[in-house]
Amino acid sequence: MPPSLTSFTDDALIAFDNLADRAAGLVNPTIRLGVTGLSRSGKTVFISSLVHNLLNGGRLPLFEPVQSGRVSAVRLEPQPDDAVPRFQYEDHIRALVKDRIWPDSTRAISELRITLDYQSASGWNRLFSPGRLSIDIVDYPGEWLLDLPLLAKDFRTFSAETLALANTGIRAELSSHWLVMTDATDVSAPADEMKARDLATAFADYLKACKSDERSLSTLPPGRFLLPGDLDGSPALTFAPLKLPAEGNAPKGSLWAMMERRYEAYKAVVVKPFFREHFARLDRQIVLVDALQAINRGPEAVQDLERALTDVLACFRPGTNSLLSSLLGRRIDRVLVAATKADHLHHESHDRLEALTRRLVERAIERIGMAGAGIDVMAIASVRATREATVTRDGQTLPVIVGTPMDNETIAGETFDGNRKTAVFPGDLPENPRWLFEALESNGAKVHLPEVNVVRFRPPELDETGGGIKLSVPHIRLDRAMQFLFGDRLA
């Protein structure tokens, strides 16, 4: 993170935590993998499938340590952070495999440790390495990550940027009630608890409307307004941006002063502890995005996804750790941006989904002026819920995907019961994503976008072996993601 986001005291505490982590790593080599995502991108499903495939000998041809037979054992172990809730892997995998329902989405931070025993491919490394690597998976909501840029913004900047964004496109409609209240607010009037609560409620309702499936917008800080948890109703979550005069400071005892104080409290109580205790200790990071849902919602949702990716990538400092940086200011040296739900497309469009997401990431990198080293992009499906087939219609052979739509899912006017399978033509993404970015830069001109059918399918029904053991969860490119994220640490 840029130095302006942390104080000297924060830096000292972060350095102390990193030294403690490295000391523990001398006895038990460990990598801390952050997993986050934007708006129902499938963080819980990703972690559950990754762990299930490692524990149950899944098909991982592109994960070299397993493919070569160098991994001899995999097991779950107690996590090192006793104050962090455990990621409930067993409950989530039971929901996926036995009940065939998608597990609940991430609403707070959680952690899980999985340990691999392996033989190094290098004879030299076998002399000095214990042949064991623990992966501490840290699961946290993407909304929390989008809060980190607030550390570098004062209340005036936060208010100006949030109000400007709220007046654009579809947001202007969704924010109309809150904006009317804000316009009618005298910021220099005496502080009023009920007025503050009404403004905060209207602001939170606007953020929730932006996140809804119908809109699928991504840039929605402050994140705890969407996931308040035990802070619900606290002063730190009872504030809202204000329309402030161009100059001057908040009068003592005013509503402005109250909102400004609570905004700073939000950063101190919510954002800084997350940054210091969790984010600043990560080694690798995967950011999951539902690019298909954004495409399906149109250019504005995609543009908002690009804006969110810009804010997300600005939080990272990808690059190689030196010994000193790893001890005092740990650097996340690999970041993977993964477009999920690739199983909702025919395989012919997987590369196109990846190319489109890669261009979004490149544009975000260009906007913040950072290097792209250490950042990769993939199209994946953590759990493959469909299979591919072909159908003949009017003498033409069309590629389709076959799966079980969720209960009450409606396709072409037909409502499904959650048990019957169907074939769906998923639509095509163009070979060149130029069409999308022309739409983003068209300044509101009507641009026709190709239609992509986004259907909610149930998790697949898994076959059993002769011994009655369920096979591992099917996926698309999960092994490739593993290889990028931690395969080098098992070399």
Image (cartoon, rainbow, N blue to C red):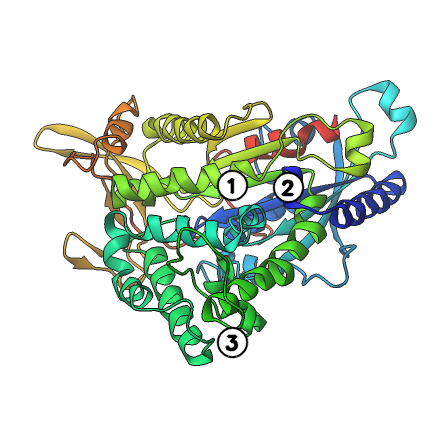
Give percent across and percent down for residue 217.
35, 50
Residue in view at x 50 percent, y 35 percent: 337
**Secondary structure found at label 2:** helix
Q: Are marks 3 and 2 in contact (CB under 8 Å)?
A: no
Q: Which is more toward the observer, 253 or 42?
A: 253
Task: Find the distance from the CA under tag 2 to the CA under tag 1.
Answer: 17 Å
Q: Nearer the viewer, mark 3 or mark 2?
A: 2
Give percent across and percent down for residue 126.
87, 25
Residue in view at x 50 percent, y 62 percent: 250
Say whether disc 3 or disc 1 marks the residue closer to the N-terminus.
3
Task: Find the distance from the CA under tag 3 to the CA under tag 1.
Answer: 27 Å
Q: Amino acid at mark 2?
A: Ser
Residue in view at x 39 percent, y 26 percent: 359
Q: What residue is pinned by disc 1?
A: 312
Left or right side of 126 for 147: left
Q: Are marks 2 and 1 in contact (CB under 8 Å)?
A: no
Can you say whether 31 is above or below 101 in the image?
Answer: above
Q: Nearer the viewer, mark 3 or mark 1?
A: 3
Q: Nearer the viewer, mark 2 or mark 1?
A: 2
**Secondary structure found at label 1:** helix
Q: What residue is pinned by disc 3?
A: 233
Can you say whether 182 is above or below 388 in the image?
Answer: below
| Numbered circle sitting on residue 4 | 2
Residue in view at x 53 percent, y 48 percent: 153
The 10 Å Cα crowd at callout 2, few under 14, some 14 to 19, many 20 or more, is few
Give percent across and percent down for residue 76.
73, 52
Give percent across and percent down for residue 265.
60, 64
